[in-house]
C-alpha cells in the first residue's frame, strides 16, 4: 500500500468527508481485513458482516487516528481485533483470566497448529477458536493480532500499549494452555 496515497485519502476524508476517498481506502484494505475476519469466524456471510462493521467503525473513528502512534494498517487491525473480540464475547461472555490457569504442567510436544492452511480440520480449529474466545480481551487481542493478523510482538506492543515482554508472555502462556487443552485431539489429527 502506498502510504502517501493513503495519507491523502485520510486527509481528504477528515477534511471534506470525501466518500470517494473513503471508498478508495476501504477498497485498499477490504480483502485483507475480510480474510483476517474469515479465518476467525469460518462463516463467509458472518465474515462479510464483521468486515463491514470494522470499516464502519474505522470511518467513524478516523478522526482519532494518530499517524505518529502507528501505521494506518496497524490501527485498522486493532479496530478489527476489537470487533472480533466483541463478537466472540457475545458468544461466550465469561472470560477466563490467564493468570488463573495452571502453569505447573509442562507440555511435552512442540507441534504448532497450522491456523492458516488447515481447512481439513476446520472443526478442530473452531474448538480452539471457541476456547481462545473464553480468555480476557487483552490476551485474545495479542493472539489474534499475531496469529491472524501476522503482527510481530513489537508491533503488537506498540498497538496495545503493553510492554513487549508482556505481549510475549500473554501469547506464549495462551499457546501453552491451548496445547495442553487440545494435546490429545491434536495428536490424533497428526496421526491420521
Image (cartoon, grey):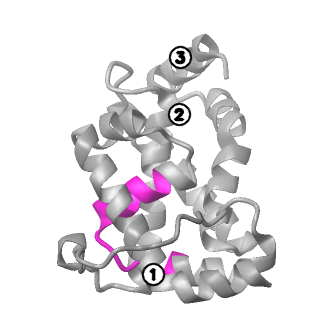
Among the two numbered marks 2 and 3 on one chain, the one whose residue lies closer to the N terminus: 3
The front one of 101 and 97 is: 101
Secondary structure beneath dot 2 equals helix
Give the number of the mark in front: 2 or 3: 2
Give the number of the mark in front: 1 or 2: 1
Q: x and y percent of residue 103 in the render? A: 24, 74
- Magenta region: which residues? 129-145
Q: Residue at x 23, y 80 (%)?
A: 102
- Looking at the rendered image, the quarter that the N terminus falls into is top right
Q: Mark 3 points at which residue?
A: 7
Q: Is the C-beta separation of discs 3 and 1 under 8 Å?
A: no
Q: Residue at x 39, y 27 (%)?
A: 70
- Looking at the rendered image, the quarter that the C terminus falls into is bottom right
Q: Can residue 94 be seen in this view?
A: yes
Q: Is the C-beta separation of discs 1 and 2 under 8 Å?
A: no
Q: Mark 1 points at which residue?
A: 131
Left or right: 68, with 74 as reference point: left
Residue 130, magenta (yes or no):
yes
Q: Can residue 132 be seen in this view?
A: no
Give the number of the mark in front: 3 or 1: 1
> Dot 3, how many residues are within 10 Å of its Cα: few (below 14), some (14-19), or many (20+)?
some
Residue 173 lies in quadrant: bottom left
Q: x and y percent of residue 183 in the render? A: 52, 82
Q: Which residue is drawn at 60% across and 88% down?
A: 185
> Dot 2, how many residues are within 10 Å of its Cα: few (below 14), some (14-19), or many (20+)?
some
Name the outermost residue toward the front.
Answer: 108
Q: x and y percent of residue 31 in the render? A: 73, 46
Name the outermost residue toward the top.
Answer: 4
Distance from disc 3 to disc 1, alpha carbons, whole Å, reads 38 Å
Among the two numbered marks 1 and 2 on one chain, the one whose residue lies closer to the N terminus: 2
Question: Residue 73: which disc?
Answer: 2
Q: x and y percent of residue 176 in the render? A: 39, 69
Amino acid at each position: 500500500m502506498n502510504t502517501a496515497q493513503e495519507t491523502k485519502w485520510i486527509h481528504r476524508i477528515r477534511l471534506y468527508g470525501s466518500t470517494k476517498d473513503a471508498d478508495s481506502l476501504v477498497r485498499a484494505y477490504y480483502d485483507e481485513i475480510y480474510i483476517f475476519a474469515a479465518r476467525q469466524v469460518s462463516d463467509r456471510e458472518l465474515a462479510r458482516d464483521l468486515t463491514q462493521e470494522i470499516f464502519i467503525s474505522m470511518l467513524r473513528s478516523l478522526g482519532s487516528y494518530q499517524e505518529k502512534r502507528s501505521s494506518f494498517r496497524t490501527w485498522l487491525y486493532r479496530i478489527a481485533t476489537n470487533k472480533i473480540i466483541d463478537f466472540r464475547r457475545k458468544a461466550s461472555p465469561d472470560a477466563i483470566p490467564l493468570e488463573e490457569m495452571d502453569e505447573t504442567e509442562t507440555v511435552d510436544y512442540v507441534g504448532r497448529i497450522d491456523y492458516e492452511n488447515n481447512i481439513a480440520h476446520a472443526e478442530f480449529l473452531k474448538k480452539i477458536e471457541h476456547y481462545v474466545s473464553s480468555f480476557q480481551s487483552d490476551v485474545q487481542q495479542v493472539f489474534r493480532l499475531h496469529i491472524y493478523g501476522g503482527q510481530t510482538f513489537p508491533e503488537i506492543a506498540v498497538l496495545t500499549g503493553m510492554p513487549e515482554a508482556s505481549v510475549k508472555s500473554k501469547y506464549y502462556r495462551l499457546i501453552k494452555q491451548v496445547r495442553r487443552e487440545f494435546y490429545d485431539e491434536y495428536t490424533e489429527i497428526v496421526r491420521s
